[in-house]
Amino acid sequence: MKITLITGATGGLGKAFCEVYAENKNNLLLVATKEDKLIELKNEIESKYQVKAYYFVADLSDKEQLKKVYEYANSNDFFVNNLVNNAGFGDRCDFKDMDVDTQLKMVDVNCNALLYFTRVFLTDMLKNNEGHIINVGSMAGFVPGPYMCTYHATKAFVLNLGESIAHEIRKSKVKLLTLCPGPFESGFVSKAHNDYTFEKIKPVPAIKVAKYAYKQSLKGKRIAIVGFGNKVTCFAPRFFSRKFVAKISAGTLKKGD
């Protein structure tokens, strides 16, 4: 059975991706940490869109649980022809005050889980010469981010990894898109303690981001930056010094910097 695997499926952009793929008649494998929300989403998707939805509870900061997701897909004879690596989180705080375990977990979820799923599911995609991968990065990946330094660094990893893989597989029909949105409506703000940025920049609806990413993925694009203003921001380092860009970035992340 062909199936679309979406991580971080139960809220914000992840749920929006579920809506978009289900609307286009894709069966879903939903991955997130809370079983009650997964069951609720599974029932909602199946009732509304008449597709099959499966779920798997996993903490993506745990390498062994990543393997269990892969094993679950294989044991059910699923061909993951669409993969959306959406799970991730941020934390706005001075680096000297950051909880180191939180930062390490951020790297595990934002980088290592994304790398793992991209690698293991790519094999069958290439074998069948069919597949689309969307790795959710951020415009943060283009610029340094004082006070959210680990988050910006993880998204730079996602961007560089994605561009590199997309080049390597360019002669196949498998496509990898790195999605780089700016602020969008989700639970990210409260978890990241980043209310200040969202007061300055109006977030866009998550469903708008998901629909744009879906269309760009089908077109075989390698990078999708959502919004003209964000595109300008992402390319600013080409024209200004990194020091200047870091200063501007810091001003959007912390009041009074």
Image (tube, helix red, strand yellow):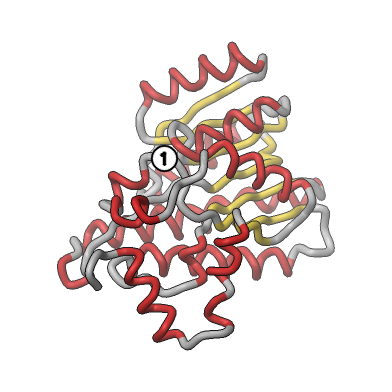
From the viewer's side, name the closer residue of 160 and 245.
Answer: 245
- The residue under the point 82% across, 58% down is 172
- The residue under the point 23% across, 63% down is 93
- The residue under the point 26% across, 52% down is 193
Q: Around disc 1, counting alpha carbons within 10 Å, would you say few (fewer than 14), some (14 to 19), or many (20 or more)?
A: some
From the viewer's side, name the closer residue of 35 and 22.
Answer: 22
Question: Which quarter of the rendered picture does the C terminus lie within?
Answer: bottom left
- 34, above or below 13, in the image: above
| Residue 78: x %, y % from top left | 66, 33
Q: What residue sits right under mark 1 in the picture?
A: 186
Amino acid type assigned to the residue bearing label 1 in the image:
Ser
Question: Which quarter of the rendered picture does the N terminus lie within?
Answer: top right
How many marks the image carries: the answer is 1
Q: In the displayed structure, does residue 203 sit left or right of residue 100?
A: right
Residue projecting furthest to the left:
97
Secondary element at tag 1 = loop
- The residue under the point 37% across, 62% down is 151
Quarter holding residue 186 = top left
| Residue 163: x %, y % from top left | 65, 67
Q: In the displayed structure, does residue 229 sit left or right of residue 50?
A: left
| Residue 245: x %, y % from top left | 43, 79
| Residue 47: x %, y % from top left | 59, 11
